[in-house]
Image: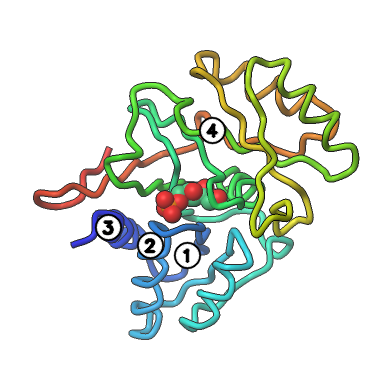
């Protein structure tokens, strides 16, 4: 079985009747959402909060009832993927461009479950370029201020034009050699005017599920 699928389906087991569930974005969270769709069709009563427009469309197709972010103040469990994850649950997210809503939803989740395949499990963060969501106004200035933190920011593009997030912002993918002081970097990035949010998720994940080749998915 696909390793992302193994991890995603395992995470769906954490969801119980009556829960409000944060629905992540990407090809691993996809499998959790698909499984939840099946369970809902079989009578499970949950409400989803999607982390992106893509996920909202998927959940709608699957018949998962949804709430708006403004209708909740707590989420029981959020399930989402990651681009990198360490043994102490530090993450880089935002490869799919949904990091802002993902971080907002994870921040109010009682339990944040991260689902990955083994290629995402790393010793130290920073091989994957760190996505940073910035406003379009004066983005060049914001990007050059970000570069002073020791990275090379590249404006994300799709089909020639800049990639625009669900929130109407740009993303710069920041190439660091490695990120040692994760808390410091998180604070420094978010202190730059023009930065909306960055893809470092520190001290947020509660459970890390890794799809493994042999046997069941591993739960850390
Ligand atoms: C989207 C994300 C995704 O969770 C991350 O990019 C992992 O995606 P995938 O499961 O497709 O590898 O942060 O913004």
Q: Secondary structure at mark 4?
A: loop
* Image quadrant containing the N terminus: bottom left
The residues bearing labels 4 and 2 have C-alpha atoms spaced at a distance of 32 Å
Relative to residue 54, is residue 12 drawn left or right? left
The residues bearing labels 3 and 1 have C-alpha atoms spaced at a distance of 17 Å
Please report contact status of discs 4 and 1: CB closer than 8 Å, yes or no. Answer: no
Q: Residues within 10 Å of mark 4 (few under 14, many from 20)?
A: many
Q: Which residue is mark 2?
A: 15
The residues bearing labels 4 and 1 have C-alpha atoms spaced at a distance of 34 Å
The residues bearing labels 2 and 3 have C-alpha atoms spaced at a distance of 10 Å
Ranked by sequence position, the earlier of labels 4 and 2 is: 2
Q: Nearer the viewer, residue 1 or 107?
A: 1
Reply above or below: 217 against 132.
below
Which numbered circle lies on residue 19? 1
Please report contact status of discs 3 and 1: CB closer than 8 Å, yes or no. Answer: no
Residue drawn at 65 percent across, 35 percent down: 198
Whole-percent x, y for residue 166 in the image: 71, 59
Relative to residue 151, is residue 36 drawn left or right? left
Ranked by sequence position, the earlier of labels 4 and 1 is: 1
Which numbered circle lies on residue 10? 3
Ranked by sequence position, the earlier of labels 2 and 3 is: 3
Whole-percent x, y for residue 85 in the image: 40, 34
Disc nearest the viewer among 3 and 1: 3
Q: Secondary structure at mark 3?
A: helix
Q: Secondary structure at mark 1?
A: loop
The residues bearing labels 4 and 3 have C-alpha atoms spaced at a distance of 28 Å
Ranked by sequence position, the earlier of labels 3 and 1 is: 3
């Amino acid at each position: 079985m696909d390793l992302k699928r193994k991890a995603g389906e395992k995470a769906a087991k954490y969801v119980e009747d009556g829960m409000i569930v944060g629905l992540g974005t990407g090809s691993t969270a996809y499998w959790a959402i698909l499984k939840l769709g099946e369970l809902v069709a079989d009578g499970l009563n949950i409400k989803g909060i999607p982390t992106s427009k893509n996920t909202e469309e998927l959940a709608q197709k699957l018949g998962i009832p949804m709430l708006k972010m403004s209708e909740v103040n707590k989420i029981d469990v959020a399930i989402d993927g990651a681009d990198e994850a360490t043994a102490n649950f530090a993450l880089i997210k935002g490869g799919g461009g949904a990091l802002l809503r993902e971080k907002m939803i994870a921040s109010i989740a009682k339990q944040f479950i991260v689902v990955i395949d083994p290629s995402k499990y790393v010793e130290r963060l920073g091989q994957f370029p760190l996505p940073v969501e910035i406003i379009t106004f004066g983005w060049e200035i914001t990007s050059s201020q970000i570069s002073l933190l020791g990275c090379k920011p590249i404006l994300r593009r799709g089909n020639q034009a800049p990639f625009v997030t669900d929130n109407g912002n740009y993303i710069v993918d920041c190439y660091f050699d490695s990120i040692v002081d994760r808390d410091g970097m998180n604070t420094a990035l978010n202190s730059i005017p023009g930065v909306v949010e960055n893809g470092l998720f520190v001290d947020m994940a509660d459970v890390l599920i890794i799809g493994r080749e042999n046997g069941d998915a591993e739960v850390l």
